[in-house]
Image (spheres, rainbow, N blue to C red):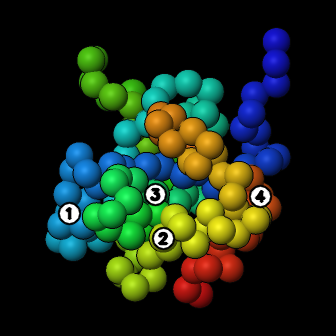
Amino acid sequence: MTEPLVRLDNLGAWLIKGNADAVDLAARFAREPLVTSWCVRPGYRARLMRAGQPVVFWASGSRARLPYGVWGLGWVTGPAEAGPPGQQWSVPLELPILLEPDRLPRQALRADGRLAALEVFRQPQAANPSYLTVAQFAALRTYLPV
């Protein structure tokens, strides 16, 4: 059996994605700029999620509409859990959405050699959660407001 790609010793932060073309995330976050839970796919990654781990919100969508990329940074507040029968799993979060001028466009992140290999670039259609390594998260933090 192969070793899992994500391990607690190489995890810098979780990355959850939302498609801003499918849902008007800009309007949603203008009304409520705090994400308190998000859907995740059941599996070993979801079972690794724990309170206190950093989490990044990634807005995806068509590249011409909005400056997609990192829109928020916060914390996991508890384990991912199954919803009622037939419903998705979700993870509780304390994840404030950044003000629009502080959001990080994917073009700038892709141009940074330390971040060009992010999983979200390599596998943009992969299910939540994605992840950043310790080194990638440290590089990402250099772009974020203090």
Question: In the rendered image of this protein, does residue 88 appear above or below residue 140?
Answer: above
Secondary structure beneath label 4: helix
Q: Which is closer to the viewer, label 2 or label 3?
A: 2
Q: CA distance from mark 3 to mark 4?
A: 17 Å
Name the amino acid, label 4.
Answer: Val
Which numbered disc, 3 or 4, marks the residue that appears first in the sequence? Answer: 3
Question: Percent from the top left, x then y, of residue 83?
Answer: 32, 28
Residue annotated with mark 2: 105
Q: CA distance from mark 3 to mark 1?
A: 14 Å
Q: Which is closer to the viewer, label 4 or label 2?
A: 2
Name the amino acid, label 1.
Answer: Arg
Question: Percent from the top left, x then y, of residue 58?
Answer: 46, 57
Secondary structure beneath label 1: helix
Name the amino acid, label 2.
Answer: Pro
Q: Is residue 21 visible?
A: yes
Which numbered disc, 3 or 1, marks the residue that appears first in the sequence? Answer: 1
Residue annotated with mark 1: 28
Which numbered disc, 4 or 2, marks the residue that appears first in the sequence? Answer: 2
Name the amino acid, label 3.
Answer: Trp
Locate residue 63: give its quadrant. Answer: bottom left
* Quadrant that contains the C terminus: bottom right
Q: CA distance from mark 4 to mark 2?
A: 21 Å
Mark 3, other Cα within 10 Å: few <14 / some 14–19 / many ≥20: many
* Quadrant that contains the N terminus: top right
Question: In the rendered image of this protein, does residue 125 appear above or below residue 14?
Answer: above
Q: Nearer the viewer, residue 60 or 137?
A: 60
Residue annotated with mark 4: 134
Q: What residue is drawn where x is 62% and y is 79%?
A: 143
Q: What residue is drawn where x is 75% and y is 43%?
A: 8
Q: Which is closer to the viewer, label 3 or label 4?
A: 3
Q: Nearer the viewer, residue 36 or 10?
A: 10
Q: CA distance from mark 4 to mark 1?
A: 30 Å
